[in-house]
Amino acid sequence: MKRDLARGGGVGLVVGGVVGYPVSRLYVEDVDAYTVLPLLVVAVAVVVPVGVLLAVWLRIIRPVRSGLLAVVLLVVLKDAVDLVVPGPGPRLAFAGFVGLAVVSCAGAAALASTEALMPRVVAAVVVCGCVVTTATVEHRRTEAWERRLRADTVASYEKSLPLVVPEVVPGRVLVQVWTIGDDVLALDYARGRRSEADVFVRISAGGDPEKACAEWERDFGSCRPATADRWFTKKGANGRQVLFAKVDGRLVEVDSAVLGPDEALVVAGGLRAVSAEYLVDFEHPRDG
């Protein structure tokens, strides 16, 4: 068993050295993963036959079984270490991966060669424990990240967005919330939760509806007043029209090819206050 430990460690040193570099590139800040993954695939494709040949050459008992077990151990240990050290630098990632490859290959060679039950049981317990712990910790980290994202988004909405929505959009329900820049609230409405949005409302903290309408004249038609502080422009090709209105000091744009002028005026008829949490729930819906 000791002999296989040493020989397996030698194979692990080669495996870790070949695969460790492309793996370490994945930990470079702001790296585009797609530029590294092909290199990683090539490294693995090269190291698999090399590892098998080394195992045979070094006369490791059951080289194929050792190789398969080494891969399992290496993946499990790497995932576990990533949780403990979530953001290592490339050099530390390389050194760590080489070390894990040595441990994994040495352990796999020793386990494959022994007939004793206890080492196999201990190894199985360790692997299962690492898998369960890794999955649990990763799940909790994901939940914590989602809570932080939600809190940050709520704070951002409260800081810069007008927290209002139209009192009513005839025959439509709110299906999506997003933002344009930092200060324009965009609301998408559809006939039902699963339907495609066909009414689009944008609300800004302030602005002049006549000037806002004039900016659309090049791609649409000329602007025409509807009522006080309400202006229309219409694209004749598809019937799409945009209403610009000043409501409670805010600029409201109602953009749709399905609403008539009267219905668009209803949408811009009044606003109701909502909380930032209400809007965030549409942008980042929570399960359950």
Image: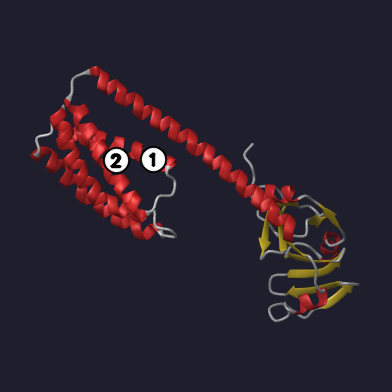
Looking at the picture, how far across and down is residue 15, in whole percent? Answer: 22, 46
Q: Residue at x 69, y 50 (%)?
A: 280
Q: Report whether residue 62 is seen.
A: no
Disc 1 is placed on an element classified as helix
Colouring rule applied to residues:
secondary structure
Q: Is residue 129 left or right of residue 281?
A: left
Looking at the image, residue 225 lies above or below residue 153: below
Residue placed under numbered mark 2 in the picture:
100
Contact (CB < 8 A) between labels 1 and 2?
Answer: yes
Looking at the picture, how far across and down is residue 207, in whole percent? Answer: 80, 72
Q: Amino acid at mark 1?
A: Val
Q: Residue at x 82, y 63 (%)?
A: 264
Residue placed under numbered mark 1 in the picture:
81
Looking at the image, residue 181 lies above or below residue 194: below
Q: Report whether residue 215 is seen.
A: yes
Q: Is residue 255 left or right of residue 150?
A: right
- What numbered label is drawn on residue 246? none
| Sequence order check, earlier mark of 1 and 2 | 1
Where on the picture, by quarter, is residue 205? Answer: bottom right
